[in-house]
Image (cartoon, grey):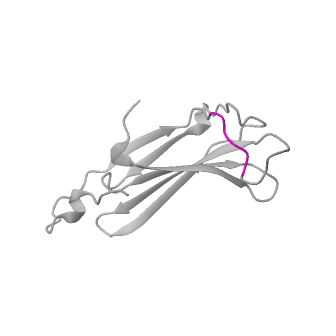
Amino acid sequence: YILKPSMLMMRERDIDPAPVQMMIKVLTGSCLPKPRGKNKGECIDPYVLVTLFDVNANEAKEICTSYRTGSVADNGFFPIFNTDRDKFRFKVENPTCAILKLTVYDSDVGKDDFIASASIPISCLRQG
């Protein structure tokens, strides 16, 4: 679990957090599994959905922003996403509460298959 930020625990919320500009660049993946229940068949065509969940402190309203990388054809072993299309800018209104979610899908005709997901609090991210 994730502890509530100290800002939410204060009785007086006079201090608004300063918005932060953040750039996320998806580089590569490694040894991505096939979707659950598919042991045989073609190689996967992975792409990453990058989503920022944030809260506007003034309006107390949830903000959800999503971007998608391009698909890498037939490469679940070591897909490389490192292009200018795979660079995303976010405005983080409340860095103490915001969470970044990275979800990997297999691009298919029809419905795309879920591969994996990870959620990371923005306060835990470091530049690099």
The percent position of residue 115, horizontal first and vertical second, equals: 66, 49
Please tell me which residue is depicted at 42% across the width and 53% down the height of the picture.
99
The percent position of residue 52, horizontal first and vertical second, equals: 46, 53
Please tell me which residue is depicted at 29% across the width and 60% down the height of the picture.
4
Q: In this orientation, does residue 102 appear?
A: no
Left or right: 85 in relation to 60 = right
Residue 113, quarter of picture: bottom right
Quadrant location, the N terminus: bottom left
Q: Which residues are magenta?
A: 30-35
Please tell me which residue is depicted at 29% across the width and 64% down the height of the picture.
57
Q: In this orientation, does residue 100 appear?
A: yes
* Nearest the eye: 31 or 59: 31
The percent position of residue 91, horizontal first and vertical second, equals: 40, 50
Residue 109, quarter of picture: bottom right
Q: Which SS type dominates the magenta stretch? A: loop
Q: Is residue 55 magenta?
A: no
Count the marks: 0
The percent position of residue 76, horizontal first and vertical second, equals: 71, 37
Left or right: 7 in relation to 39 = left
Please tell me which residue is depicted at 36% across the width and 62% down the height of the picture.
55
Quadrant location, the C terminus: top left
